[in-house]
Each structure stands twice: as C-alpha cells, then as structure tokens.
Amino acid sequence: MRVVIAGSSGLIGTSLVAALRGAEHEVLRLVRRRPSAPDERGWDPPAGRIDAGALDGVDAVVNLCGAGVGDKRWSDARKQVLLDSRTVPTEVLAAAVAERGVPVLVNASAIGYYGDTGDEVVDETSPSGSGFLAGLCRQWEAATGPADAHARVVRMRTGLVIGPSGGLFGRIKPLFSLFLGTRFGDGRQYMPWISLDDAVAAIRFVVEHDVSGPVNITSPSPVTNAEFTRTVGHALHRPTPWVAPAFALRAVLGDMAEEGLLAGQRAVPRVLEQRGFQFLHPALGAAVAAAVEG
C-alpha cells in the first residue's frame, strides 16, 4: 500500500513510519516546511493547501496531528490551539480524501471522548461525555465528515501511550526515578493505556483491514491511577507513598487537572478484540517492563 502520514514526527508517528515500511508499505510524510527528502510532501493546513500530486495513487491517509493536551495549562487561548490543531488539519485531509478518491482515512481522536465514566466499562458504542475534552473529541471526529461518503473512515480513540521515551512514560519516569512518583487524588480514576508497540500495531491493523467507525486504541485491561502508580514504581524499584491532593492539582493546573488527571475512562477495545487483533502487551506490568528495558 501507499500510505500518507500527517503528524509523522511524533511519538506514534515515528514508530508507525518504521512499522509500515517494515511491512513493505510505501510511506510518504506530509510536512509543513519545504520538503527536503524524497518521501516528503508539503502542506499548509491553515491555508487549506496540499502539494499537487501528494495524494496521487495513495491507498490510505493516516492523520495524527494535534498539539499536546498536557503540554501547557489550559487557558482559553490554549484550548483554542488544542482544538484548531486537530480540526483544521482533519478538515483539510478529509476534503482532500473525498476530492482525490483516497479509499481510506484513519484519523486520530482520543479516549477523552467519553468524559469521566467512573468505574463503568465503556466501548465504542458508549455515548460521548461532558467537559472540554469530550467536546474537543466530538468536534475532532466531526471534522472527518466530508470523507464519510467517499472513503472508509476510522476514528481512533487513543488512550495513554506507554513507550520507552516520550509520551506519558517519558514524562513520569524521571519523577519516579527521583522518588517523586505519586498518586493523583484518591487514585480510583481509571487510566485507559496502551503500549507504544500495540498502538502502532493497531493503527497498521485498521489500515490493512476493513474496519471503520470509532475504534478504541487501548489495552483490554484499563487500571486505576493507584494501580498504575504502584506498577510503575515496582518496575523502577521505587516506593510510591506520595499523594498529590486533588485540591492542589486543581489549584495549579485548573481544568487540565480536573479532566486530565482526576477523571478517567474504563474503556476497552471492543472493536479490535472482535476483529481478532492480538495485543503484545495486554497487561500493564509487561508494557511498563518493556518501556523500562527500552
């Protein structure tokens, strides 16, 4: 297959390029600067422009674009950046897929679509929740609409990705190493996670197989924040007695703490399981151990 990837320089994108090429697919990367390599094609999402011929003969487009949700405190301006960095590229790619006859669009979304679900198990048939992240995900997914009548569209609701560097684990590993690993609030909120290897394999799976609609890119065994903290501490041989009180997190991080740290989703990958996808790391301990070993 010939696959175009937008957002190829991030944690998932970098590994996905390598995995697809390892499976003998041809991969082209959309870049926002002047292309400088044979596999690069230029585009400018705010201007609605993609280089002529960039999607010629393409079998699938994978869109992973989006500013980091946890990179900065959520001011009103930052929330707009988070929204625009997702919906604008998606709208441009969805329109291009429809116009140029690309048969498959695989588009990022996030597990925040479901809002805070407590200990209720949710899958792809569950409704969207409330809050900023849920609304963000609804608009993100709606931006794929122009492609729906023309292509097979997959909306990937991805959980917290655990890999050797970058992403969630890359941020927390130094804290745990310094004996600063901590539970957030009461620790009962669920964390839908997935190993980097499984996230990449799942994206390749939906590209190659006849899957459409929402797909939870998560492991089959979500854990509570307390269990997650204990597991990481055990893997790094560090005690985890500390607790970051909810009120302190709210005071420092505002809405980002409420929705990003103190809320959770007990989400399961029902579609992947029904389609026979095999997880390399179905349990958190194995995923963290693989990340530690690097």
Image (cartoon, grey):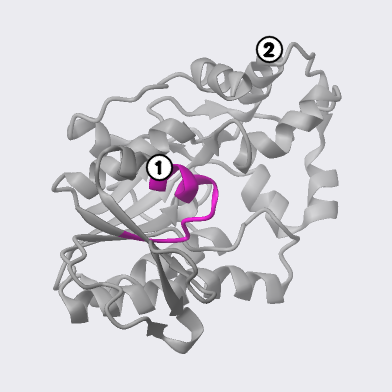
Number of labelled discs?
2
Return the x and y of residue 245 as percentages of the image width and height.
Answer: 82, 37
Q: Amino acid at mark 2?
A: His
According to the picture, the residue beneath numbered tag 1 turns out to be 18
Q: Residues within 10 Å of mark 1 (few under 14, many from 20)?
A: some
Q: Is residue 282 above or below residue 87?
A: above
* Left/right of residue 21 with respect to residue 76 in the rendered view: left
Identity of the residue furthest to the bottom in this view: 47
Q: Which mark is residue 234?
A: 2
* Left/right of residue 51 with respect to residue 261 in the rendered view: left
State whether residue 209 appears in this view: yes
Return the x and y of residue 208 as percentages of the image width and height.
Answer: 19, 45
Q: Quadrant of the C terminus?
A: top right
Q: Amino acid at mark 1?
A: Ala
Q: Which residue occupies 15% across, 64% down?
A: 103
Return the x and y of residue 149 as percentages of the image width and height.
Answer: 14, 73
Magenta stretch? 4-17
Secondary structure at numbered mark 1: helix
Return the x and y of residue 26 as percentages of the image width and height.
Answer: 27, 53
In this view, the mark in front (2 or 1)? 1
State whether residue 122 appears in this view: no
Q: CA distance from mark 2 to mark 1?
A: 31 Å
Secondary structure at numbered mark 2: helix
